[in-house]
Amino acid sequence: MFENLSERLGGVFDRLTKQGALSEDDVKTALREVRVALLEADVSLPVARSFIKAVEKKATGAAVTKSVTPGQQVVKIVHDELIQVLTGEGEPGALKIDNAPAPILMVGLQGGGKTTTTAKLARRLKDRDGKRVLMASLDIYRPAAMEQLKILGEQIGVDTLPIVAGQSPVEIAKRAKQQATLGGYDVYMLDTAGRLQIDQVLMQEVEDVRDAVKPRETLLVVDGLTGQVAVEVAQEFDDKIGISGVVLTRMDGDGRGGAALSMRAITGKPIKFVGLGEKMDALETFEPERIAGRILGMGDIVALVEKAQQTLEVEQAERMMKRFQKGQFNMNDLKMQLEQMMKMGGLEGMMSMMPGAGKMAKQMEGAGIDDKVIRQQIALIQSMTKKERANPQILQASRKKRIAAGAGMDVSDLNKLLKMQRQMSDMMKKLGKMGKGGMLKQAMK
Ligand code: GDP
């Protein structure tokens, strides 16, 4: 999800993070692009505008700490601001369900995922919180909808209210309440009927049910892929019915994600859960940190920088840099680099913290590079003697065979590793020549 926005911002910040210092103009230019990206991600104009304003204010006045570049600082400010806008009060995913039996009213348009989400949430309450849950469908217009909930209930082991033909939604709701009380249920969930669009009859019906059961939670289920429409629907339901939270569904698709940001900013209602698929376990609490990271696609550059600094001792780095400047890059250096990569959470861990990671990860996969390969490469280097590591060019065919066998690999794997070391060594030589460490120093920062 959010691929579009993250890729766009990835490009913007890629440029930023490569610059040493950041002027006010740079901030402005970057934020202009962030704004376009937000709008393209279907964030509403006023929300994008006020978001950018807040970031600009913080970015311009912010002191740039030593450990990060100004570009990374801006990234962090954008990231923090996203979290601030996305965060609701209270614990993520918390529901008011004390005073059994607690009614939960599920509302929304048809096809938004209401029935599916009702069942997903019931399953979560049962399995995770150990609650006894009763579900009831109030969709008297579509017998298939009632049947659907019943089938889902059987599938997840949650009781549904027996279907009685000819009752009104309010009557069904009252019956659900009665059964929940008599049956000792903790929660009863009411899956209301949806319409293709908001209409007066629907709203009145939901209002009547609301008044009849006084729900502890009224959750609006909306299709996250519909962007602005989702926000408008939420506003309308909130005005008429009063909602306590939102569930954004289809966040597993390649939606534009801006809906989450606008939803929070415009309605002020917490997004409690996100739907991530059709399966019954594809419901997760809404986590601002994760969503912000995904919107940005930057992961957490700052965390990467700090982590890298912790792991890589400065001394070691300096020693290495001196050698690199002379164009020296042997197997020991390569091993150190590979180990460094593993320490930072392996390729996957590192990737998740880097901009444009999605794309790159795919490329690396295509090239057959993954954590397993890195570990194998380290094993190969470990099978070499000290002398061979320092001077891999002395390796003869017979030694190559034994080293590969020692690491449980093929000679072709070893040859690939040797080629990699030669290429890195060549690159270091070139970099070393390009002005005494200028480039390299930048790259090491
Ligand atoms: P309702 O009319 O609002 O009750 O919608 P349904 O619950 O019947 O869902 C409509 C369709 O959307 C079904 O095929 C669901 O499987 C699917 N669906 C619901 N939630 C999600 C989700 O989070 N991700 C995906 N990919 N599909 C979903």
Image (tube, helix red, strand yellow):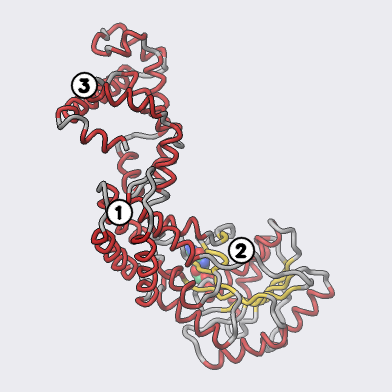
Give residue 179's mark. Answer: none
Earlier sequence position, callout 1 versus callout 2: 1
Q: Which of 51 and 230 is in front in this view?
A: 51
Q: Decide: is 245 above or below 341.
A: below
The part of the image, by quadrant, that contains residue 364 is: top left
Contact flag, marks 2 and 3 (Cβ < 8 Å): no
Can you say which quadrant of the picture contains the C terminus?
top left
Mark nearer the viewer, 1 or 3? 3
Earlier sequence position, callout 1 versus callout 3: 1
- Residue labelled with disc 1: 13
Q: Seen in the image, is 346 located left or right of residue 70?
A: right
| Distance CA(mark 2)–CA(mark 3) | 56 Å
Residue 175 in the image: state x and y as whole percent: 76, 82
Rate crowding at label 2 as few (under 14), some (14 to 19) or many (20 or more) other CA atoms within 10 Å. some
| Distance CA(mark 1)–CA(mark 3) | 32 Å
Earlier sequence position, callout 2 versus callout 3: 2
Kind of element beneath mark 3: loop
| Distance CA(mark 1)–CA(mark 2) | 32 Å
Q: Which amino acid does label 2 sit on?
A: Gly
Q: Nearer the viewer, residue 368 or 146?
A: 368
Mark nearer the viewer, 1 or 2? 1
Residue 24 in the image: state x and y as whole percent: 27, 60
Rate crowding at label 1 as few (under 14), some (14 to 19) or many (20 or more) other CA atoms within 10 Å. many
Rate crowding at label 3 as few (under 14), some (14 to 19) or many (20 or more) other CA atoms within 10 Å. some
Kind of element beneath mark 1: helix
Q: Which residue is drawn at 37% across and 44% down?
A: 66
- Residue labelled with disc 2: 93
Q: What residue type is labelled 3?
A: Lys
- Residue labelled with disc 3: 326
Residue 414 in the image: state x and y as whole percent: 31, 19
Q: What residue type is labelled 1?
A: Phe
